[in-house]
Image: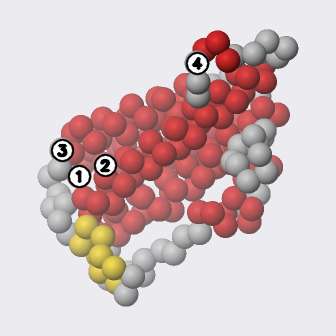
């Protein structure tokens, strides 16, 4: 595994997320293209909770605390139970970027760990390297989602003019 490159991917994705969510009003952040889709605000809240309660927490667990109980999470359920779309967008952005900063500071000290250390439970096994790789890939999933939401936003603010000439989406 190429730790330095993956770490840099997290640094880069942080800035991409920052750019994709910049200058979006509270009202626009709450817009959902369809009832089942997530809003930008919901994506940011999700990233914040995942940063604190999933990837960093579980990677630390695999590497340093296997004798403790693995934290169960409910990312899909949290959207409704934590009322993501009712949160303050600017505050949630700040919280996410603060947590990501903590994660990046914590991760930089892990470059020499044994990435093959594995946690095994009745649900399967997860090596530390896989958890870290999934963290990086998880950002990409939500960057794609934010790009789609940004495109939807652009389509709304260009009215009455269309954006079809830009090309097929």
- Up/down of 39 relative to 120, above or below: above
Q: Which of 161 and 94 is in front in this view?
A: 161
One can see residue 19 in this view: yes
First in residue order: circle 2 vs circle 4 = 2
| Labelled pair 2, 4 in contact (Cβ < 8 Å) | no
Which one is in front in this view, the residue at disc 2 or the one at disc 4? 4
Residue 89 image offset from top left, x and y in percent: 72, 39
How far apart marks 2 and 3 lie (CA) works out to 13 Å
Residue 2 circle label: 3
- Sort mark 2 into few (<14), some (14-19) or many (20+) by Cα contacts within 10 Å: some
Give me the residue at 34% from left, 37% from top.
9
Q: Judging from the image, what secondary structure is the residue with disc 3 in?
A: loop
Residue corresponding to mark 2: 107
First in residue order: circle 1 vs circle 3 = 3
Give me the residue at 19% from left, 60% from top.
115
Residue corresponding to mark 4: 167
How far apart marks 1 and 3 lie (CA) works out to 12 Å
How far apart marks 2 and 4 lie (CA) works out to 40 Å
| Labelled pair 3, 4 in contact (Cβ < 8 Å) | no
Left or right of residue 7, residue 41 in this image: right
On the rendered image, what quadrant is the C terminus found in?
top right
Q: Judging from the image, what secondary structure is the residue with disc 4 in?
A: loop
Q: In which quarter of the image is residue 67?
A: bottom left
Count the marks: 4
Residue corresponding to mark 1: 110
| Labelled pair 2, 1 in contact (Cβ < 8 Å) | yes
How far apart marks 2 and 1 lie (CA) works out to 5 Å
First in residue order: circle 2 vs circle 3 = 3
Give me the residue at 36% from left, 55% from top.
134
């Amino acid at each position: 595994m190429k730790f330095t490159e993956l770490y840099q991917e997290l640094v880069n994705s942080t800035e991409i997320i920052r750019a994709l969510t910049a200058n979006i009003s509270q009202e626009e952040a709450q817009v959902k293209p369809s009832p089942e889709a997530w809003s930008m605000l919901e994506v940011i809240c999700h990233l914040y909770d995942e940063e604190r309660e999933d990837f960093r927490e579980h990677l630390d667990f695999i590497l340093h605390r296997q004798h403790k109980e693995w934290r169960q999470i409910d990312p899909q359920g949290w959207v409704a139970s934590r009322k993501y779309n009712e949160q303050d967008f600017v505050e949630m952005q700040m919280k996410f970027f603060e947590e990501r900063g903590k994660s990046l500071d914590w991760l930089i000290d892990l470059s020499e760990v044994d990435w093959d250390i594995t946690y095994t439970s009745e649900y399967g096994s997860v090596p530390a390297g896989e958890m870290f790789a999934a963290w990086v890939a998880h950002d990409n999933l939500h960057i794609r989602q934010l790009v789609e939401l940004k495109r939807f936003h652009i389509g709304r603010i260009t009215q009455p003019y269309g954006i079809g000439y830009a090309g097929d989406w």
